[in-house]
Amino acid sequence: MTEYERSRTMPAQPEQVFDQAANVGQLETWLPRDLHVEPEEPPAVTVHEDRTDQDTSALLSARPEQMRLEWGTREQGSYAGWLQVAGLDSGASEVTVHLSFFDDSHDPGERSVAEALDGSLRRLEEQVRMRTDNAAG
């Protein structure tokens, strides 16, 4: 098993960050560019990965009371992950994303995963910033 984790501080309230992250209709605005999520009967989703051109049955569950998203493959059990939002005293938030690959054939490698996670967190921050700027203005 291989695990990866990245964190980023975002200048917004944790509820705003979590609401944006958990919005199933807007996941593609911040997920890695080659992943596409199609909602089904909750918590089921289908994930299409451009790199492999494959659709995978997965689960996605939001736990608003914990400000946590959890996901993973259904049949194969090849990967799982979570996103956790924590409030900071400054009014900002820290967002942590964790991925676990149980099957080495699904692990794209440390560099690829680090770039994907960092890019996803950066895009999530941009989405949150646009949302909070629009609400304020």
Image (spheres, rainbow, N blue to C red):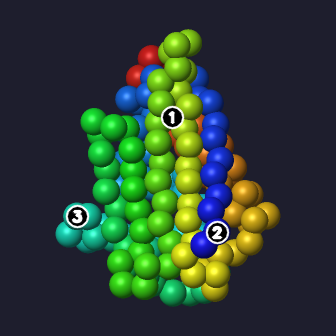
- Which numbered disc covers residue 128? 1
Q: Which mark is first along the chain, 1 or 2?
A: 2
What residue is rendered at 47% in x and 66% in y? 80
Comparing labels 2 and 1, the label whose residue is closer to the camera: 2
Residue indicated by mark 3 = 42
Can you give x and y, in whole percent of width and height, for residue 81 in the image? Answer: 49, 60
What residue is rendered at 39% in x and 56% in y? 70
What residue is rendered at 64% in x and 81% in y? 104
What residue is rendered at 50% in x and 72% in y? 79
Mark 2 to mark 1 CA distance (whole Å): 30 Å
When asked about the image quadrant of residue 71, the answer is bottom left
- Please, what secondary structure does the residue beneath circle 1 have? helix
Comparing labels 1 and 3, the label whose residue is closer to the camera: 3
The answer to the question of whether label 2 and label 3 lie on touching residues, with beta carbons closer than 8 A, is: no
Asked whether, in this view, residue 1 is left or right of residue 132, the answer is: right
Residue 6 appears in the picture as rendered:
yes
Can you give x and y, in whole percent of width and height, for residue 72 in the image? Answer: 42, 68
Instruction: Give the residue type that dot 3 points to.
Output: Pro
Instruction: Give the residue type that dot 2 points to.
Output: Thr
Residue indicated by mark 2 = 2
Comparing labels 2 and 3, the label whose residue is closer to the camera: 2
Instruction: Give the residue type that dot 1 points to.
Output: Val
Q: In the rendered view, tell whether residue 106 sits above or below residue 127.
A: below
